[in-house]
Image: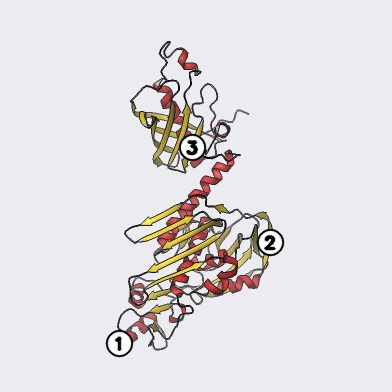
């Protein structure tokens, strides 16, 4: 895999009609600077709004992946993004004078050919790979979809599709070397659908720009000449439709497993929405845009989490997310009021687990109580609150410029005394967020897996005062 970022050398354009909206569009690829990522720009709209190609801007996944920002949208971006990722391009401006890229032949090949024509430029910044070092899973039992990412020093993707339809059956495909295989083995794989879906899609107001030559239509039920004529009229075609060897108009497969290869193409495009290239082995069963995007969001969250951790934890330590030095960089508290020693688990925006080692050297034991030392319950609450503060500061705001103020404590309960020699395990779990700055959190404390205290907090994020 490439180690330095790259963009294209020269601008190139492609024109045509969008698959679902039926609108005409000229799309222009332009070079972009280091670390700028992939951006779509609607040059036909006032202000020329920019839409970053990441999962935070997905607004629809009904029959393709649609990105949006305010009133600006770009429909069906997956084939374009697959071409960009397949050619390992990191930074690119994609200008459109319409709402949907040209469909071309229903594959990524037309975009790949244009980008190859543009040429590439190696940039100075290193690629910001997200290295998957833990198993990441997505499952949807109802849809029978499973996607898993496993650690791998490279990128591989394997897919199984099974539509429980004899016309397609079960198919498998795998991409093992992006640089060697993508352009010739996967970019030409066209989108496909079943004959039974075509009229339904038309009635839903989709595939307005569809043509029999822009997709492989698989015959999954009997259809007579009258039915073919009705379909031709609905598609507004100027030629007759025929059935050849299980496909409409003799539109034969380019590969025996072209549908499975196209599913890999779609997944590569949707995983581009992580925002950075990944090193992982991806295994998927019956994936679709909805599942792909949910999986991309999950991995993008992991990327943000790793980015936050690297910002404060300079030395990677087994079993530790933040050591005491990192905690000093995050929290404003200092001795004798810093009551968390390390963070051992962090799920961004969701949950954090910290450790407080309770020793006889704690100042409060001098007076609480002489001869019978017990950790004050209010300090256990404070320790849970500090762990909660780490979750909030890292999940939402820049800790250098903000403080966490706790507004209320509810349902506080103390189950067992905490004594010198105990190790407090402190958990904080996000319950709700209001207006982006008010948070409800559930805190729990354990010793030897036994609950010792719990409480619910309301907190607010407050900018630090500038005293200069």
User: Mark 2 = which residue?
Assistant: 122
SS class of the residue under badge 1? loop
The residue nearer to you, when weighing 368 against 448, is 448
Seen at 54% across and 60% down, the residue is: 155
At which x and y percent is residue 65? 45, 63
Query: Relative to residue 451, is residue 166 depicted above or below?
Result: below
State the separation of the CA atoms marked 1 and 3: 65 Å
User: Mark 1 = which residue?
Assistant: 224
Res 410 quadrant in image: top left
User: Mark 3 = which residue?
Assistant: 344
Relative side of 9 to 145, left or right: right
CB under 8 Å between callouts 2 and 3?
no
Crowding around mark 2 (Cα neighbors within 10 Å: few <14, some 14 to 19, many 20+) is some
Relative side of 57 to 142, left or right: right
SS class of the residue under badge 2? strand
At which x and y percent is residue 193? 39, 74
The residue nearer to you, when weighing 422 against 291, is 422
At which x and y percent is residue 21? 44, 71
Seen at 46% across and 75% down, the residue is: 258
CB under 8 Å between callouts 1 and 2?
no
């Amino acid at each position: 895999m490439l180690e330095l970022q790259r963009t294209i050398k020269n601008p190139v354009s492609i024109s045509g009609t969008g698959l679902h909206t039926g609108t005409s569009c000229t799309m222009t690829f332009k070079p972009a600077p280091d670390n700028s990522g992939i951006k779509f720009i609607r040059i036909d709209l006032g202000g020329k709004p920019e839409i970053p190609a990441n999962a935070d801007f997905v607004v629809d996944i009904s029959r393709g992946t649609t990105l949006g920002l305010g009133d600006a949208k770009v429909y069906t971006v997956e084939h374009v993004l697959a071409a960009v990722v397949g050619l390992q391009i990191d930074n690119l401006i994609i200008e459109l004078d319409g709402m949907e890229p040209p469909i071309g032949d229903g594959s990524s090949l037309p975009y790949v050919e244009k980008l190859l024509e543009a040429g590439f430029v190696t940039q100075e910044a290193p690629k910001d790979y997200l290295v998957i070092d833990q198993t990441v899973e997505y499952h949807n039992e109802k849809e029978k979809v499973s996607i898993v990412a496993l650690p791998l020093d490279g990128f591989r993707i394997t897919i199984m599709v099974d539509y429980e339809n004899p016309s397609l059956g079960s198919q498998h495909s795998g991409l093992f070397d992006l640089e060697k295989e993508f352009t010739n083995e996967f970019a030409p794989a066209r989108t496909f659908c079943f004959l039974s879906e075509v009229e339904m899609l038309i009635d839903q107001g989709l595939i307005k720009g569809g043509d029999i030559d822009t997709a492989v239509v698989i015959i999954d039920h009997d259809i007579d000449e009258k039915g073919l004529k009705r379909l031709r009229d609905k598609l507004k075609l100027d030629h007759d439709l025929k059935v050849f060897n299980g496909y409409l108009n003799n539109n034969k497969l380019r590969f025996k497993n072209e549908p499975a290869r196209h599913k890999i193409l779609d997944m590569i495009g949707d995983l581009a929405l992580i925002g950075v290239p990944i090193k992982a082995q991806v295994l998927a069963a019956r994936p679709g845009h909805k599942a792909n995007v949910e999986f991309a969001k999950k991995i993008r969250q992991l990327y943000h989490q790793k980015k936050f951790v690297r910002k404060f934890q300079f030395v990677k330590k087994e079993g530790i997310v933040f050591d005491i030095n990192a905690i000093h960089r995050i929290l404003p508290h200092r001795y004798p009021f810093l009551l968390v020693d390390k963070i051992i688990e962090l799920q961004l925006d969701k949950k954090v687990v910290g450790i407080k080692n309770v020793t006889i050297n704690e100042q409060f034991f001098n007076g609480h109580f002489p001869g019978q030392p017990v950790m004050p319950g209010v300090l256990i609450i404070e320790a849970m609150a500090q762990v909660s503060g780490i979750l909030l500061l890292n999940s939402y705001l820049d800790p250098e410029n903000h403080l966490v103020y706790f507004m209320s404590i509810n349902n506080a309960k103390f189950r067992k005394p905490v004594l010198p020699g105990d190790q407090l395990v402190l958990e904080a779990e996000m319950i709700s967020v209001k207006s982006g700055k008010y948070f409800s959190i559930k805190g729990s404390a354990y010793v030897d897996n036994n609950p010792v205290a719990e409480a619910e907090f309301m907190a607010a994020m407050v900018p630090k005062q500038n005293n200069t």
